[in-house]
Image (cartoon, coloured by chain):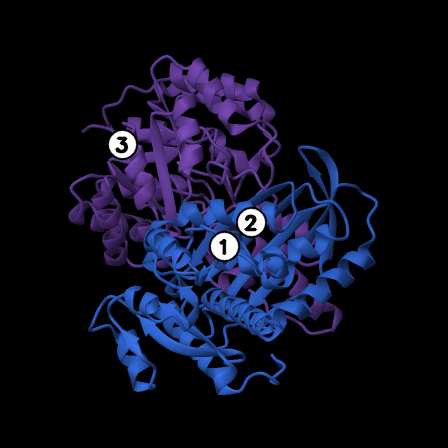
Amino acid sequence: MVLPSVNASPNGRVKVAILGSGNIGSDLMFKILREPGHMELALLTGIEPQSEGLARARSMSIHTSHEGIQPILDDPDIKIVFDATSAHAHVRHAKLLREAGRIAIDLTPAARGPYVIPPVNLGAHMNEPNVNLITCGGQATIPLVYAVTRVTPVPYAEMVSTIASLSAGPGTRQNIDEFTFTTARGLEVIGGAKQGKAIIILNPADPPILMRNTIYVLLGSEEVDREAIVASVEEMVTAVQMYVPGYRLKNEPVFEVRETPEGRRTLVAMLLEVTGAGDFLPPYAGNLDIMTASARQVGEVFARHIQSQEIKQ
Amino acid sequence: MKAPRLTDTTLRDGSHAMRHQFTSEQVRQVAIALDKAGVPVLEVTHGDGLSGSSIQYGFSLTDEMDLIEEARNAVTKAKIAALLLPGVGTRKELKDAIGRGIQVVRIATQCTEADISQQHFGMAKEMGLEAVGFLMMAHMRPPEFLAEQALLMESYGADCVYVVDSAGALLPDGAAARVRALKEALKIQVGFHAHNNLGLGVGNTLAAVAAGADQIDGTLRGLGAGAGNTATELIVAALDKLGYEHEWDVFGLLDAAEFVVAPFMPFQPIPDRDSIAIGYAGVYSTFLLHAKRLGQQYNVDPLEILVELGRRKAMAGQEDWILDVTLELAKQKNEGKSYGSL
């Protein structure tokens, strides 16, 4: 995306660190290096001295450490910390970072702070010390549910995420229920649906399929302004494309009338495809790409906010 | 020779053909009849497992938890089972179902993704349930591969793992080879679940039993997804004639099929044109009614939709791809392109 580059001189940039040297941490590193905006990646840390991720970062002249969170706490200039470890580890990290006065952007399912979706509610959380990115499926689908609820009330929203088996790591596989709960909750809390439901399917096809999401939204009444809904959805797709270029609807929203337990309702179905930018992870892993792209975007917005606060002072 | 254990899934796989519109009274009558005829396990759940009631798969008329309880109260000896697909249902619904009286849970994953089921097997065993693994779309991978996935489920605590021919795409040799591979690799029991899309429900089940299957599935009148399942009354009659020792009341099951189930069936599933295409193309049997509905709505031949879904290697539960494919085919049709044929 095009960012204002007025304050983006190296000296004026806000120092950030990535905690976690796995696939997600590495992809995020590539994204920040490619488009630093108002950020300067000061450090990437892990806990395995021999980790490939740390070696890769070193080869790109990024400072690294295998001592986890400690070197980040030791450097007071680091203002923003991306946590790409695990929910379990983040519970501890969240407390330490809060005490140290750093902003934590949480890519794990720990959810110690409010859920954020950049084009929906990020602005409301600029004073939070910790924000959470929900799930990959949540980042993909919640914006479109919100795009409908801002036009008309939505009693029920459902998302079906199909991802390539190869892009589902052990964390997702061992905690698949958490994906379902958290995403459904995000559809309600941020998407604005009265009730949310999430389904995830792994597809082992070779070559791997691109991340696919289907969003079903039941509307409160049969009388709906289709044009307003379509326009709102298109606007939202454009807003997400600003930071996830591979985000696109395969068709215009499809309207149907369905029998539901609550009677006849208008259904809006949206078929979404996410191609990853291929920064480090392969393009089919759109599910991982949308997490790191959202994280980078959230970091950028916080960095700009910090700078503007400093200028005021 | 001892007959395999029979699980009747009329009240779960049959839910697909019923478009998930089972009433409590229908469930009660079927449960009573199966229990009386000596069927030891009855599966009762939304067709797509616990929490399957959705836009993606179809909403249930009656809450599945109420149906589970209805069945549990209707039986005297039979155990009640529920199906759970991790990614659709969660441990929360499993816990609710245990509270309503299930004693067996069948945990189903794509045949390549057994490792998403660990937490569910863990809970099932912790809560004292019998836990059965279901490797769906088993035709898509060779026997040795399936055996490795089954070993994962065994390590999570499964008491039995099924080879599940969700697409009704296997031929008898393929069914037998897969059951044999699991029998050789596992210490626990092995099961086989068939669909009749190629007219091989009974044939494949017999081949699986000959290969050593300890558990098999059936539904009364074959009520189920696609061309339906192995008919319970047919397989018991066949196994009886083959001389297997069993405790089933064969004529009781003929009566249950004819006088309890047939009267409320919306249609008799048979290997018709579109169902055969499902078996031939190797797609999930439940796609049948969705493809028929969307095909009619968008004026596209359901057979073309199903074959294209097979080409894209759609897996179990990917009903949303049917809309995607239908819209694409409709668009191509309007643009005057022909789209190949079977």
Disc 3 crowd rating (10 Å Cα; few below 14, some 14-19, many 20+) is few
Would you place residue B215 above or below residue A267 in this image? above
**Residue B72's spot in the image, x, y percent?**
42, 18
At horizontal 26% and vertical 45% (from top left) the residue drawn is: B153
Asked if disc 2 and disc 3 are in contact, CB closer than 8 Å, the reply is no
Asked if disc 1 and disc 2 are in contact, CB closer than 8 Å, the reply is yes
Q: Quadrant of the N terminus of chain B?
A: top left
Residue type at mark 2: give it. Gly
**Quarter of the rendering containing residue B61:** top right
Label 1: state its secondary structure. Answer: loop
Q: Quadrant of the C terminus of chain B?
A: bottom right
Q: Are marks 3 and 1 on the same chain?
A: no
Chain B colour in the picture? purple
Query: Which chain letter goes with mark 3?
Result: B
Can residue A49 be seen here? Answer: yes
At horizontal 66% and vertical 69% (from top left) the residue drawn is: A239
The blue one among the chains is: A
At horizontal 82% and vertical 49% (from top left) the residue drawn is: A224
Q: B226 left or right of B240?
A: right
Label 2: state its secondary structure. Answer: helix
**Residue A72's spot in the image, x, y percent?**
34, 68
Residue type at mark 1: give it. Ile
Q: Please name the residue that numbered disc 3 is placed on.
A: B126
Q: Please name the residue that numbered disc 2 is placed on.
A: A186
- In the picture, the disc for residue A134 is 1
**Residue A255's spot in the image, x, y percent?**
74, 53
Would you place residue A193 above or below residue B260 in this image? below
Kindly report the distance in space between the C-alpha atoms of the residues bearing marks 2 and 3. 30 Å
Q: Are marks 2 and 3 on the same chain?
A: no
**Quarter of the rendering containing residue B251:** top left
